[in-house]
Amino acid sequence: MEIFCMKQENKPGRNQGSSAEQTREELTAKIQEQDKKIRELEAKIKILESRQEPESGDPNGSRERFQQLADAMPQLVWTAEPDGEVDYYNKRMELYAGISREDDGSWNWSPVLHPEDIEATVQAWNHSVETGEAYQIEHRVRMADGSYRWHLSRGIPATGEDGKLVKWYGAATDIHEQKVIEQELRSSEKRLRRLADSNIIGIAYRTESGVIYDANDAYLNLIGYTREELETGNVRWDKITPEEYIHLDLEAAAVAKKQGACKPYEKEYIRKDGKRIPILIGYALLDESKDDYIGFVLDLSELKIAQKSLQEYTDKLEQSNKELENFAFIASHDLQEPLRKVQAFGERIQKRLEGKLDTQTEDFFHRMLDAAERMQAMIDALLNLSRISTRGQTFEPVDLNAAIKDAVANLEERIKETNGQVIIEKMPSVNADPDQMRQLFQNLINNALKYHKPDEPPIVSVWAARTSGGIGSMAGFRIFVKDNGIGFDERFSDQIFLPFHRLVGRSQYEGTGIGLAICQKIVERHGGEITVNSKPGHGSIFSVTFPDN
């Protein structure tokens, strides 16, 4: 993948900064401005002290004026003796941070700072007390509501005329919003750096007019240029983009500038060696200036090769299926004529020799004609199977209520013979082949009626449910066909959809063994899926899912 940053034309060299760096510079400027206020406070304090007049009779006058000034400041302000003993803090400290003095008037650090910041703060403070040097540290201060906010704290020493330390003045400025933004930027930069250092993603910066002036190794490997060639300013996006894709890039950049981002799209690059490579690319604005863009490009070469191989395999498979279906149709059609002759001549011989054959020979004729009849049924079933794909109708909206009612009407005699019952709930409409929908549910219901328990009338329930899709499933309608029949071992659930495959003997249950194969073929043609759950002696539940659209 490649990341583009589009800059103005007057910046042809390496990237001079990033949005994150600019934001950090702004934060630093704000902190410096607030630091300036602390220094101004120190200057005002000295002015107040210098103005204290012995004849005023008020030795605490300057102190009171200082406290008034400190209480008016937006910072948390405090003072301390030369040994570090805190002797004053302003009202904002009490109201904002919820700090109160101990009974003996001493300062208690533990409820003030975040536990993780106490050690570093104490170390910085002790060092300043020992050396008389000012200190600055960022730490989290507890608020009255129990939350913590980042503050920049500074302690400034004040000395007397003899140069000795006489007082400490300190203030803590709230920098929480700036700190949060800075932390988010750092996290974002780390993620971006991991992205840039990967071998999959290429990252490049370019001017708005098209000069690519910076890139990571992955991107350079993608286009086949060296870093030295890139730094000459002669590598341009329009030079490495085929002409037929230029308009796509212009449209994408326009969308990104207007909406903040554009959807990824496919195009090609022209490598230095002239070879074309397919890529996936997208853009997004880096900041509000709308001059910088970030783009993502993924090399699709291997994917395209895999897609081509898959398409070739799919085409061959479709051709093989067509040939197989044609063969089945032709073979079945050609088999019918000789089979009809076998049946016709067999019936003539049986009729001509009626009463002249012994019992064993008569039995042979019956077996031969029964076998021919079963063969005819199998050929008809094979023809029906081959026609699912070759003779299907155009899809149209189909009311499954009507389709299933038609199927049940065709099974009226079977239902009477078995004393069965078919319960149908409200069905949806699907886009399908009308005749194949009737055939699908006729086969499923007929299968449920056929494999009923000898001593129990069959009950078949048909209902529908909406499925929203998800992992391992598709969105659409799911139709269930449940019976109370003999059931089967689910280990053989895949085998029951194979043509002419039966789990029970023909002597117990009649049929060709191709009905469920036809069901599966119909469902596959409609882009759906058919599954079954069963247990010996507890019936079966067939599930047919039709996808949306």
Image: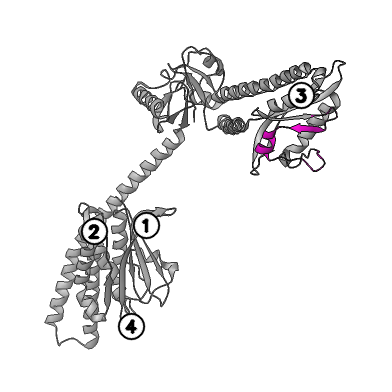
Mark in the foreground, 4 or 2:
4
Q: Is residue 343 highlighted in magenta? A: no
**Left or right, residue 193 beside residue 59:** left
Mark closest to the chain's N terminus, 1 or 4 = 4
Label 2 sits on residue: 331
On residue 61, which mark appears? 3
State which quadrant residue 308 falls in.
top left
**Left or right, residue 235 beside residue 313:** right
- The three-letter code of the residue at mark 4 reads Glu
Label 1 sits on residue: 467
Mark closest to the chain's N terminus, 2 or 3 = 3
- SS class of the residue under badge 2? helix
Q: Does any portion of residue 499 appear in the rendered image?
A: no
Mark in the foreground, 2 or 1:
1
Q: Is residue 82 above or below residue 491?
A: above
Give the class, few, some or many, for how many residues have Cα within 10 Å of label 2's Cα (few <14, many ≥20). some
Mark closest to the chain's N terminus, 2 or 1 = 2
Label 4 sits on residue: 456
Mark in the foreground, 1 or 4:
1
Mark closest to the chain's N terminus, 4 or 3 = 3
Mark closest to the chain's N terminus, 4 or 2 = 2
- The three-letter code of the residue at mark 2 reads Ala
What range is drawn magenta here?
80-106
